[in-house]
Amino acid sequence: MTSCRRNWIFNILAVRIFAIGGKISSLFAFIIFLNACNIPAKIKTGDEASSSGQFWKATQLYQKEYDKSRSALGKHAAAFGLAESYERMNQPLQAEKWYEDALKYKPGDVLTMYRYGLALKNIGNYTLSYKILDSLAIQVHDPNRFNVLMTSLKNAMDWTADSSINPFKLSEVDFNSPASDYWVAIDSNKQVYFTSDRANDEKDQYLWTGRAFSKIYKVSEGSDSYPLNTEINQKMVNSGLLTFSPDKLHLAYCKCTGQENADANCKIYIQDKLKGKWTDPYKPAFINDSINYLSLVFDATGQTIYFTMQDPSKLSGFDVYSSKREGTVFGKPIRLPGSINTEFNEKYVTIDADTLYVASDNLGGMGGLDIYKSYKEGKNWTPMINLKSPVNSPFDDFGFQIISHSPTDSLVTQIGYLSSNRPGGHGNDDIYFFEKVRPPIAMSTPQDTFKHIKKYNLALTLYVYGYGVANNRESTNTGDRKPIANARITVPIDLSNDTIWQTNSIGIVKKNIAFDKDFTLKITAEGYLNSSTRIKTSDLKIDSSKTLQELSVIVYLHPKLYEVEFDIKDIYYDYDKYNIREDAKPPLNNLVQLLKDNPSVSVRIASHTDCRGTKVYNEKLSGLRAASVVDYLIAQGIDSHRLSSIGYGESRPVTNCKCSDCTEAQHQSNRRTTFELLK
């Protein structure tokens, strides 16, 4: 059973990062469970309570086991179980305490040390977390294992120190309670709604937290509030995350049932306002009972929705998807690109015009869930930018919602709400009101004011990673990518006196520059193909409250390996066709640029088919597909002597399935093009 705030998918960071010698910890078997939190079977041990999602009950049983145990291993197991249970209950201070205790009874245990290091980060003890992870990296003989995490710890310390000059100012709202209060929504009458698991007249207890089921509340006069008396709030059901479309003609919310044998996943419900009345709630047509859904927001038109869901088949945690209304129903969900979705959890999403705000527990944050923003540029989303402290903290921060933009002559440019379980509030999760304040502008001549500046002062952060190799092909697994130390970045001479930059030991270079036109950076590294990236003035989203703009760019380099297959991402073909589709041209243009960056390289283009059709026909069809790519590359100025082609037919599928049972998506994944470097 899940709730709209707490969900059965555990933080997969421990599994993704903590794989030693290629073997994933047996913890994975415990992580993926679907048992309901309110199973009436008699629970006797902490492990039984935890595996059924009854974490509040688990803490009681583990505590008894801890007190009774007379062995170090027994004490360690109980303390570790207590730490995990408190972590799942969003009580990081208690979790850190018990991880520390568990380590006393099993000193040097690698998994406990790792989880203790993460727990320290999630309560803001960045210095000790860094020391623990640094010593653990030495212990497992892999000094680079935790580089990304350790870099995030350094960033978090810097962001915390700079919190006072951050334009966001926070204050706690007066309708918080000792319970968990989060996620604000505003209706057309400026009425405030929020989600809470505060005590009410319902006597049933939610066994995940030991508190009441979450309900949607409405704020009345002052700090008073009351639960909605509608079918939205039902007995033994977690309801929450209410949201309205910008035009207030649509609303949506999350509902998670809790009765015995009921659906264990959360679902999203929508209501539309027709002729002044709300329709009955309905689930979008794409809702799948095997999938767990969470937050949802509407775009400005109300015709496109963005939402988060966890698809067990992908093992990538919660991700952000979109769906466009087609007639009267919402169409097939589309997963947003890797600039937004990571292999970790993107659990909560909100929107303001062309900007998505996403709460993610990815490695680059300050700890727990951090709030990031990404802009829509054409059909693409920019890489996510961390909003830093005080918006973010070591704890869970989410539900960032802009309520209004103030007049341009006001020092306050935005107001809104966010949710956090950081210390200092009334209860577990609390709601905070924020203002984004524009710093006072010093007296100056008109040409000196920000909007007239010709050159942009830019804090540029460049991350250089290399793709990994697995099974004699370039790996698409993000866990196989590694930061590249000592990569050389060639900079235009009119941009910087220092025309050669070099990445540090964890693949990062940071520079403050001033520029007034687009420019290209050329990246080289030993053992990798050359690459280049174009920095455009249009890439910047100007924050008028800052004189130093920020831009983060990630560059991935292909390893210089011969007779190894490299996928050309998103090069697909229609069934029984070999023409170049329009959606294939952008990635093909990337290949064109790669060949231009590496003028001495020759490649063999290889194309593939799905399993339908005869072997002979498929070999011919794949050959035509490869030839069409070669023709395209030649038309873009690539010398034909550097190109050759081959068709492999159906002999090398990336998705193995019984042909008669393959889905169209599986067939599509096999109709692709790859390339190999030739000596």
Image (spheres, rainbow, N blue to C red):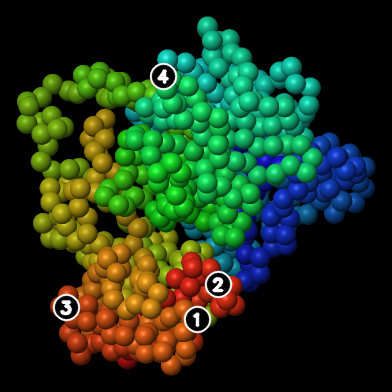
Quarter of the rendering occupied by the C terminus: bottom left
> Which residue is denoted by mark 2 in the rendering?
662
Label 2 to label 3: alpha-carbon separation: 35 Å
Which label's residue is closer to the chain start, 3 or 4?
4
In contact (CB < 8 Å): disc 1 and disc 2: yes
Instruction: Report the residue at 34% width, 87% height from top.
Output: 623
Which label's residue is closer to the chain start, 2 or 4?
4
> Which residue is denoted by mark 3 in the rendering?
635
Label 2 to label 4: alpha-carbon separation: 47 Å
Q: Is residue 50 above or below residue 412?
A: below
Q: Could you tell me the amino acid type at mark 1?
A: Cys
Nearer to us of marks 2 and 3 is 2
Label 3 to label 4: alpha-carbon separation: 55 Å
In contact (CB < 8 Å): disc 1 and disc 3: no
> Which residue is denoted by mark 1 in the rendering?
611
Residue 216 in sight here:
yes
Instruction: Report the residue at 55% width, 36% height from top.
Output: 282
Q: In the image, residue 104 lies at what x, y percent?
A: 77, 48
Q: Could you tell me the amino acid type at mark 4?
A: Ser
Label 1 to label 3: alpha-carbon separation: 31 Å
Nearer to us of marks 1 and 4 is 1
> Which residue is denoted by mark 4 in the rendering?
188
